[in-house]
Image (spheres, helix red, strand yellow):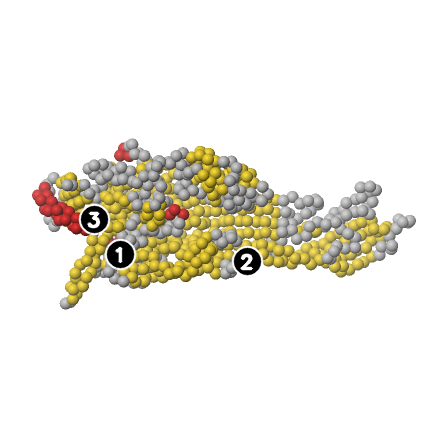
Amino acid sequence: MNSLRLNIQPGSENYLPFAKKKLGQLKERLAADSFSLCNQRIIVDDDKETEIFVQSAAGIDYIRITQKSETLKKRLFLIYVSGNSQGVITGINPTANHSGANYHVGDILTIVDDYGKNGTIKVLAVDSSGHVSTVALNTAGVRYTKGIKLTTGGAGYGCKIEITSATELDPYYELLYLPPPNGIGGDYRVLVYSFDDDFEELKPAGSVLEGLHISDTGTGLNVQSGQDVYYAVLANIYTYNETIDNAEFMDTGWNSTVLIFGANRIVGNSYDYTLAKKEVAIGDTIVIKYIPDKANMIKTGSPSRHWYVLGPDGYVEQCMFFRKQQLLGTGVINQELSLIPEQYHRLWKHEIGYRATPESPVSTGALIGSDYQIGTLGADSSDYQWKLHYILAAIDKDTALVKTVENNWTKGGSKPYSFTINLTVTNRWYTDPGGQWYWTTDTYIYNGTTYIEDDEVVRTEILKIGGIEIENLTYTESRYMQGEALAPFVWIPGGWPGMTLVSHTGDAHGGYYDGVESAGGSISSIVPKYNASLVVYQLPNPHDGRRSDAHWESITIGTKGEFKKSGERDLHVLTFDTSPGYDGLNAGGGSPLNAGGGSPLRNFIIFYVKSKVNYLNLLETPNVTDDRQAVPIRQTIDDPVQTTYYMAYRTGGGALIKTDLGNDIRVASCQINGKDMVYTYAVFKSDKFSHRIVGHININDGTRKEVTLKDDDTRLNNFKHLHHAAIGVAGGS
């Protein structure tokens, strides 16, 4: 038999018998429907607006009776997840396990592990081909395990290193929530705060929120809040993911399922309201309509954050939205400038699927887009391009949160370029006896060909919700490689093989060749970055000082190699929310999201991250001037990748507002409930926790306020955590 917990406001005891009767009916329903939790909220039409809340769950029954005579403030709650910072790298093998290629000394490489984060190494030594030989630990990261690990970043590819030691990870465990009165959460700690409309401060208001149900099947931190019913999907240390579109290094979206440790884990929140049938008379006909069943929430299989929309009459007209895909083809794509196909991918036609009611057949909503891959890579790759669409969440039949990634080669391939050398040589001759000097002048022309690799790829990433563009990123990679066309040579009197004599003036009068008196010329080409010169100099005979053995070393076309990466890329969504479905997605309540043909979402909040890259590797052998050997010039720019987090939101159909949140925030969580939009995230500095931001946006007037917490609330005493906290909001009017 369940224990009964009472929370009765003084003066409302006369409603207790009625509440117990309702509780009994609720328990019958709980048993009949095999639910693990059931509750009901009743508003009594009296002068005190009495509110009765009854709930039955495993092991406990609960009754709460309150009246308007008590000032009821809004409540905000933070759910902290237990955990420790484990898997810190303490040692690596300084010799690379696999050397890779094309790396440079000083490259910073990120260590890839299933759950590891922020671990990097620094390249200390490479050979002439960029094969890594020696590395050193740069940052220790967290959640790493020992073993051979792949790395990413730097100028090259394929380097693997060995982690020889790391702090031990705790054994894998399932999270356990202990509801009141038996506990205040085992692996969770729920802190409740009250606040007024001005949101000047948060006042502690207990450690547990009645009606809270927590599931540990998630990979993120999300709370679905309704009227006295709250579902939280939280994650343990092994399955938390910072983004919803790249969970476990896979292409995912809201409510995607990923298999981790033999168990299915949900990305986002898989909970929402059920829909209840209602018989409605239309003329002489009784039809079945659906309304939100606010008293119950169950796990749903739809991939949508909100899975229904109400029509103007208050009845469901769209529900159970999902990503509808039609396979167009399969294959591999080349990322950026890579000439090696590296990512297997399916190409899809993306639409939104939905049902008019839970019992209706599947209908097709808006076409989001079709993936494609065209062109080929080869001697001329300028026609190669591809585009992929990612539906991160379906909002209604016409609207989705969508990311697109596009890769376009604007220049590509190895192409021949012609050049012309014009050469004029004046030779000196002498007669013996007599010592008479004579000069002859010869003009030559040489037509040659060299090959130049000149590639450029532009990558575009766009994030949109409905018709509103949240972010548009452009990233460019370019590669220019020009080899040496003609090596230096020793002049042979009478010409250079391959050169054509154009004119000859003067007479040697049968004299002896003394050497080059002077030489000059020019080189012409239409090559944009051509690096060439024509240089002459003489070498006296070391034995007699005469110039009869003089050599002339003339033509060098210098080499040039340039590899650049610049721009913004790697756009990912951390979390988001839209107006709850039961309130309607447009102002006025109940009207469809895109009523009238494409009107955008009025209220939403999105957290996302992007990276900025600036890299240059230039190796150039300049034109030879007066020296026998040119000295190569190297220029390197390898700025650290700059990661920046953003919050974008919109209230009441107003302007889109974007805020830069800095370079290191963690575990963002947000929720919209009624006219309240709340959010929280942890700010880190130098990889250490600095403070927590808790924000509130009033949807009615757009006012935004924030408070700062240090996560030092006494209710967190003796509770180990990594500052991972989900947020929810409820109560008030």
As drawn, the label of residue 378 is: 2
Task: Determine the CA span between mark 3 and mark 1.
Answer: 22 Å
The three-letter code of the residue at mark 2 reads Gly
Sequence-wise, the earlier of marks 3 and 1 is: 3
* Neighbourhood count class around disc 3 (C-alpha, 10 Å): few under 14, some 14–19, many 20 upward: some
The quadrant of the image that shows the N terminus is top left
Task: Determine the CA span between mark 2 and mark 3.
Answer: 61 Å
The residue drawn where x is 42% and y is 57% is 346
* Neighbourhood count class around disc 2 (C-alpha, 10 Å): few under 14, some 14–19, many 20 upward: few
Q: Residue furthest bottom?
A: 284
Between 350 and 732, the one lying in front of the other is 350
Residue 90 location, quadrant: top left
Total marks drawn? Answer: 3
284 to the left or right of 86: left
Sequence-wise, the earlier of marks 2 and 3 is: 3
- Label 1: which residue? 308
| Secondary-structure class at tag 3 | loop
Horizontal and vertical percent position of residue 592: 27, 59
The residue drawn where x is 24% and y is 58% is 358
Horizontal and vertical percent position of residue 532: 66, 52
The residue drawn where x is 56% and y is 43% is 130
- Label 3: which residue? 35
